[in-house]
Amino acid sequence: MMLFAGALLITLLSSGFTEFNTKGEPREALVAHTMLSTGDWVLPVDEAGDMSYKPPMFHWLVAASSLLFGSLSEFTSRLPSALALSGLVTATFCFFARRREESNAKDTDTRQALLAALLTFTCFECFRAGTNCRVDMVLTFFMCTAIMALVRGIERRSVLRLGLGALLLSGAALTKGPVGIVLPLGVVWVYALLQGRNFLKVTAVALIVLIAACLLPALWYYAAWRHGGDRFLSLAMEENFGRFTGQMTYDSHVKPFWYNFVSLLTGTLPWSLLLICTLRPRRWRIKAPRLSWAKIRQADPYTLLSVTAAVLIFIFYCIPKSKRSVYLLPMYPFIGYLLAERFMALIRERRLSAKLMRRLVTIVLILYPIGYAIVFPFSVNGRSDRAIAEDISQIVPDKEPVYTFVPDAFLRYYVTNHYLGYRMKSLLPSGQTPGADRTPDANDIAAVPGDCFYLALSEKVWDGRQIPLSAEGGKETDFGIHSWLMSRGLEAEEIYRSERSTRDVKGRLVLLKVASKTGTEKYDTNR
């Protein structure tokens, strides 16, 4: 409990002072806000008509924490990730420190288990994910703890632990989809076979766990399909299978083959740097490792599991074209153990000082909250769109909507909308509807909001300096917004232009007051 409390305190100190400054965090928070505002906790659809690209577990947690604290904020949005990181660190320590009942395993050094947990906690990628409002750390918690529970269940023939593992796999699937079940279960299956266990028994147990783990996600997928129909089904197929096979209708995080290698090297900083510094220069002579089934089966179970998990997860995420550094997060507890094992061996060989190792860990534990609570907020909060939202709120009357025209299927004013109290409403239809693979323009606007309304759009669109992305001819260089206004007898007065570009949409934000040329305003903007 002390380890969990300490990790949670450091993580919360590091996550509660930074404003939203990228579209990723407020985009996830928007789903939780939609749940709270509409009461739809199965498949909430936001004001733009978009449904979430991911299952709802993370958003349920954000909504629940917001209900607990009374409002949706940066703190409540990041709290699930902080709890997941703290739980992952605690589970890593408990798993590697409490395995003394197996007759074929050596007593685990508690110090090595603690070092593995601390190294996992302080790896840059892990700590960053634990301080963000994103699904990745919650997914990592479910996947890694499921592996640990299933391994214990197989080794001790415990139905209770296998059931717990299946429940954790369900949580992973409800966070990111089927990959949350398939990948961890595959790791456990391969690990059990490498230990020399009976193929048929291990496969039978894996199939039973697979069926049990699919029950709860299947209920949600069925309910979501009843809500969203074929539109939801096509979105789920594209996100889960199209992303893996490279058959998505749009490019998403497409990276070269070497990207994961660099991500792992930078993600494990500062400990990857320490590992490199402790390597001894040797002659450039490569010896092929002499492995045999006997040696593999006699290997330390911790080491075998860690290597198996790290290698399989890494290879799995090298297959799709879509690559992100956070996809590799389930590797980190096992990489942490391998690093701890290496550093402890260096300490025993007197090539690394135990005192130095303690000081390095302590320094990193101090620097992270200082950097994330003081330095990072100081550098990025000034670039957040909160100031733009505050300027708009001074102009637009309270609770009055602000309509937006962003001719892009995926961009929204997410940060500005969050700090504006989610008052922005898109004039364009959802980018998830059929035919949304082309660049939208003013011809796609469904209806006029009224005789008088506020409209926010990019200066590049309003000033007519941006060329349409689609190859279709006959379109205005401003995506037709001026022609649309004229054809409907509307005139627009520019009443605000932000001093700098927004974080979500390229270009400075322009706020227009749109009114009918012959109509009468329905409200007084000074009230």
Image: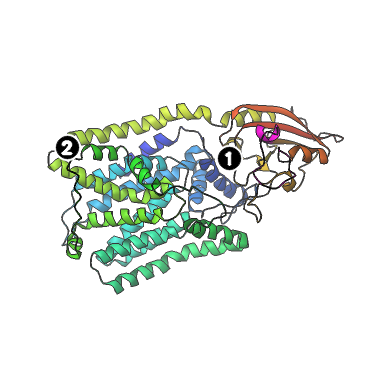
Q: Residue furthest right?
A: 518
Residue 471 circle label: none
Placement of 228 over or under 447, stated as above or below = below
Q: In this view, does 521 lie to the left or right of 221?
A: right
x and y percent of residue 28 in the render? 53, 45
Which residue is rendered at x = 77% and y = 34% of the image?
A: 514
Who is closer to the viewer here, 469 or 161? 469
Q: In the drawing, does residue 468 fall left or right of residue 520?
A: left
Left or right of 429, for residue 520: right
Q: Give SS at disc 1.
A: helix
| Image location (x, y in percent) of residue 80 | 44, 46
Q: Where is residue 209 in the image (x, y as percent from the top left)?
A: 38, 67
Residue 4 placement: quadrant: top left
Mark closer to the chain start, 2 or 1: 2
SS category of the residue bearing label 2: loop
Residue identifier under label 1:
414
Identify which amino acid the numbered label 2 is placed on: Leu
**Disc 1 residue type (three-letter):** Tyr
Which region of the structure is painted magenta?
456-479
Picture layout, residue 271 above or below residue 136:
above
| Residue 159 visible within the image | yes
Q: Residue 352 carries which label?
A: 2
For residue 116, which quarter of the picture? top left
- Crowding at dot 1, Cα within 10 Å, few <14 / some 14-19 / many 20+, comes out as many
- Residue closest to the eye, 59 or 206: 206
* Residue drawn 58% across the image and 35% down it: 419
Q: How many labels does the image show?
A: 2
Q: State the quadrant of the C terminus.
A: top right
**Whether residue 164 is visible:** no
